[in-house]
Image (spheres, grey):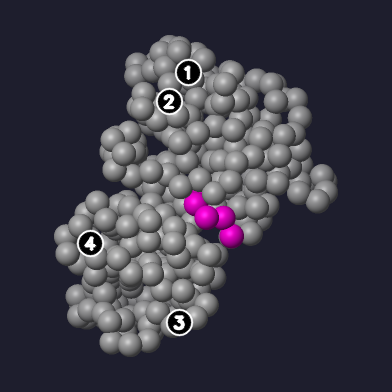
Amino acid sequence: MKAVVYNKSAKPDRLVYCDVEKPAPKDDEVLVRIRAVSVNAADYRSMKMGMIPARKIFGADVSGVVESAGKNVTLFRPGGEVVGELSGCGFGGFADFAVATEKALVMKPAGLSFVEAAAIPMASMTALQALRNKGNIRQGQEILILGSSGGVGTMAIQLARHFGAVITAVCSTRNMEQSRSLGADRVIDYTKEDFTAGNRKYDLILAVNGNYPLLKCRKALKPDGRYVLVGGALSQIFKAIVIGKPLSVGRKKILFLAAKTDTGDLNYLLDLAARGIIKPVIGKYFSAETTAEAMKYAAGGHSSGKVVIKWNPEG
């Protein structure tokens, strides 16, 4: 089969589109023919840190068709259309075929294309768990979303709108209209305005992949407010955990979310998408052969929404 394989000696991108052996599913695994796969920070950050999957194939968010299933698999049968998040199964999505356990997969709703479905898992579960689990979002609350234009941010706006929050989004000039169209009540251009200036206070601040001043953010919280950091570089995460603990004394909380794959959450999000309540924003498409370019583009941090690879959308 064809796959994009990590090769430390391959310059400049260390990712090679080549022929490799097709994986065989174990008794508790499902073999999926990949139709589409999206790029996540988990892919390019893992590669940068030298955390290489055992099969040397990245790619976590996938959609495709069940090719075969092990004898212990009960939920999926050949021909079934599925969506998965494979980071807990060793990645492997940048390939014609990938193996996964039942716990990593759910059935794809008929109303969603493979490309749309592949853009949902990791970013959308991160946004949901940050808002609901860590942020305790409630109807009518004032929510500030820092970094509203990427995969997590675009989904966070839509979910916060669905939960009935009043949303302020922070992004660059070129993404302001996108944030408004997704449901933000107010948009701040961070290149022209300091989002911590003024007297506006928030029930929840969701910080997506950014190095934001914690003391200023804490000051912008209401007395019972919460600041939740999702993703980011190791230095940003370390700062949020170490500095956040003493800053969480009292009712204001500085929190970090390490999102987890949850098939219940994934089914919930796919249902919202199938009903048109949320819609994955896809900033750019790539082909299987240009996966290295997709990784480089996503790592640049300038994509408006998700980066999706149409691996074999019609095959």
- The image quarter containing residue 21 is top right
Determine crowd level at label 2: few under 14, some 14-19, many 20+ residues with C-alpha closer than 10 A: many
- Residue 165: mark in rendering: 4
> Between disc 2 and disc 4, whose residue precedes?
2
Q: Which residue is mark 3?
A: 193
Residue 211: x and y, percent? 50, 73
Residue 198: x and y, percent? 33, 87
Determine crowd level at label 1: few under 14, some 14-19, many 20+ residues with C-alpha closer than 10 A: many
- The image quarter containing residue 182 is bottom left
Q: Which residue is mark 1?
A: 66
What residue is at 60 percent from the left and 25 percent from the top? 312
The answer to whether mark 1 and mark 4 are in CB contact below 8 A is no
Q: CA distance from mark 2 to mark 4?
A: 32 Å
What residue is at 28 percent from the left and 82 percent from the top? 200
Q: 76 and 303: which one is in front?
A: 303
What residue is at 70 percent from the left and 25 percent from the top? 2
Residue 294: x and y, percent? 65, 46
Q: Which residue is mark 2?
A: 82
**Quadrant (top left/top right/bottom left/bottom right) for the N terminus:** top right
The answer to whether mark 1 and mark 2 are in CB contact below 8 A is yes
Q: CA distance from mark 2 to mark 3?
A: 43 Å
Which segment is the magenta one? Answer: 302-306
